[in-house]
Structure formats: structure tokens, C-alpha cells
Amino acid sequence: MRRLSISLLVIVLLATIGFGWTLDRLFIELQPDEADRLAPYRVVGEALVRSVENGNNLEQLTSAWPKDSPLQMGMIESDTLALPTALRADLNQGQSLALETDDGVTLLVPVEGGVNALALALPPQTSTAESVLRFALTILFYAGIVSLILLWVYPLVRRLHALSKAANEFGAGNLSSRVPITRLSLIKNIETEFNAMAERIATLVEDNRLLSSAVSHDLRTPIARLRFGLDALSEEDDAAVQEKYMQRISNDLAEMEHLVEVLLDYARLEKQQRELPLTPMALAPRVTERINALFNDTSHDIEWDPNSDVAAESIWVMANERYIDMVINNVLQNAQRYGKSKIRVSISTSHKNDKRVWLIIEDDGPGIPDDERSRVLKPFERGRANIERVRPASSPSSSGFGMGLAIVHRILQWHGAKLSLGTSSRLGGASVEMGLRASASPAARKTNTKMEVN
């Protein structure tokens, strides 16, 4: 809206001041020279003064001049005129003067050395050409203002029409409808907000559909196993067999509980995103803490390289600690689940030659095929490696529900971060690269603030 207001102000100022000044200069240029208009009357006045023998005869001539003549004349004493010193000197030296008042233009021709003067009251200039010029320039002025405003309004109307069309299509059920944003749009902020709103609504609808599918699909299997286990348990008298069935029922209940927790966590993410505060955070210590928490008892070989570019303690990012911990946990758990024996974690500030801090987690597992990389970022979508994995009975949720990378993707979107899936050049498995916005440390911020104040 600020850009819209400024552009409107510029157009109004340009139309009024610019056109007004231009047309005023044009009118002055087209007007006949005042000296040229006075020249014939000056010649007449000077000829009358020379043709009459003395001032008395000239006064008689002016007295007898017809009152209905367009050109009126009379005698006047120059001493009675309140003239500037320079003009009075010119009149005394015999030069004629043209005086303009509210009543019109009067030409003074000196007589007898400037004591008296012949006053010629010039007829008002009623030029048809001047009237036509004034009318034409007035019409041109208003036409110019209207033209400039139309030039400003036309692209605005086009953008509003595009916004209205996208809104109608979206309301009719086309959730993929978006407003094409151009760099010069006057309502770019509104269009951006509309597209963001449409994206959130479309994501919410899609998430609800996926949640419904997950509930109907992923809960159906453990519920069926529970029913079968209860039926079998009621018919079995052997204590050992009953214990086996009880363990299976316990595992199924644990799986159902875990799935419900995942569903609820994902459903709450959208609401919590609106209250997501971002603060400067040292990234390397958080990664170290997550690695120690997850891999205290593991057979995987963990290679943790905090940074190969700058000192690890100087790497700060804008993030929310709680959700960044969730991101790191999910990616590390995926690497542990699918990696065979090695996991490599590193941080780089020059990975893609941008101003982001990149957290890179690699493993030596089967990796993610190119045709699956966009799909596995959606909720409840699992790659072939996940689907084909044999799940141990003692860990019913070890294969996951296809939510890990979906949650990572959603949280990184809220952080304004980037997520890239690829193949590790070192280990041969999956490579998950997360580009977070860099930030200065609190100490550096205080130093910069002090320098600015000083």
C-alpha cells in the first residue's frame, strides 16, 4: 500500500505542477510581444505631439476627441504621477512610458520636456486568437491530467482483475489458483499475501485429507491385529502363549499411541507457527547436544565436523530452538534408521556461495531416488527404502509413518530456510542439506550497537 500511495502522489504532483508549468510556458511563448502591440499606439502618440504646435492646442485636440472612440486620450501633468525615479527620468528625457493598471494599459507620451504628457488609454485587447489559445490550453491541461491518471489506473485495474479472477477460481474449488506477481505491480504486497494465504489453505486442506487417510490406513492394521490378538488370547490357555499374545497387543498399542502423537503434533504445527519466535542461536552446540542425546548407545560411526570454514563458536543462525531441535532429531533419526554404519554431520557457511549457514547430514544407506525426493517431503509419504524395510517386532514404529521429512520441510519453511535432498558424495547414501538464515552473535550485536552510538 505504501508503494501505491507514493505512486498516486507522484502522478498527482506530476499532472498538476508539471502540466501546469509546461502549459504556462507555452502560453507565454505563443502570446504576442507587448512591445509589438504598443508600437502602433506609440507612433500615433508621438506623431500627435509633433504635429501640434504647443500643449494648449494639444489639450484642445484631446478635449474634442470623440468619447466613443476605442482609443481615449487626454492631457496629464507628469508631476502628479507617482513614478519611480528611474521612470520619471526617462519621461523627462522625452521617452514614452507604458503603465499597466487594473483598468488597462495607458501610454504616456511626454510634451514640452516632460512637464505634461499625452495619455493614451489603449483599448482592451479582445483577440479571438488569444481566447482560442486559452481554451485550447485549458482543455489540454485537463486532458493531460486525465491521461496520466488513466495511465496509472490501468495497470492497477489489471492487477485487481487478476486478483479477483484468482480469488473466484480459488473460491470455486481450484486450490492451485494463484496470482501471477510482477515486479512492477502496485499491489505486490496484497498479491503476495493472497498467494501465501491460498498456499496455507491448500496445505491445510491437503493435510486434513492426508490425516484422514493416515487414520483410516495406518490405524486400521494395528486395530485389526488387536482384535485378532484378543480373540486368540481368549481361546488360549497356555500361559507362555498368552504372554506372547500380550506382548504383541502391547506392541500394537504402542504403535497406535505413537501414530496418534505424530498426528497431533503435525496438526498443531500450523497453529504454533503463528507464534514462532526466532532468536539468534549458536548452531554447533545444538547439533552436538542432539548427537550426544541420540547416539550415546549406537553402533553407527558418527563423523561430526562442526565447520571447515570458520570457527564453530562464531556460527549463529536465526531460529527457534525447540523446532530446530525437532528438525535435527528427525533428520538424524532418518540417517540412523537407513544408514548402514556411517553418518556424517557438518556445518558450512560457503556451501552454496550464499549468506546462509548450511547444516548437512549424510549417511551410507540406500539414499533417496531422484523421482522420490519431492514426494517424501509430503506427510505420510514413504520412500521405497522405508516401505521395503523389515520392521522388528520389538520396535513397531521403527519404520516411521512418513512424517519425519514432512515436518522438517514445514518447519524450515517457517524459518525462511531451504531444504535440499541429494546423494552424499562421501558416503553414497542420502544427503540432507538445510540452509538457515545467518545471524550475528549477541556479543557482536552489542559491539555494533555501541559503535553506532559512538
Image (tube, grey):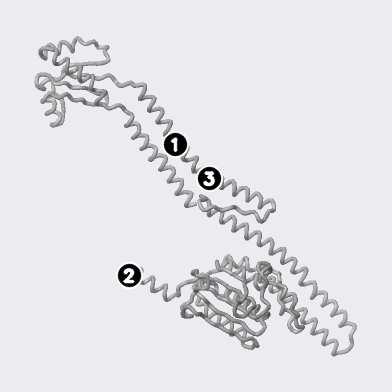
- Where is mark 3, residue-wise? 155
Report the residue at 62% width, 76% height from top.
Answer: 331
What type is the residue that disc 3 sits on?
A: Pro
Which comes sooner in the sequence, label 2 or label 1? 1
Report the residue at 10% width, 12% height from top.
Answer: 53
- Where is mark 2, residue-wise? 454
Mark 3 burial class by Cα count in 10 Å: few <14, some 14-19, many 20+ = some
Q: Secondary structure at mark 1?
A: helix
Q: Secondary structure at mark 2?
A: loop
- Where is mark 1, residue-wise? 144
Mark 1 burial class by Cα count in 10 Å: few <14, some 14-19, many 20+ = some
Whether the residues at callouts 2 and 1 have beta carbons within 8 Å, the answer is no
Camera-side mark, 3 or 2: 3
What type is the residue that disc 1 sits on?
A: Gly
Which comes sooner in the sequence, label 3 or label 2? 3
C-alpha span from label 3 to label 1: 18 Å
Camera-side mark, 2 or 1: 1
Q: Is residue 77 above or below residue 282?
A: above
Q: Is residue 307 above or below residue 214?
A: below
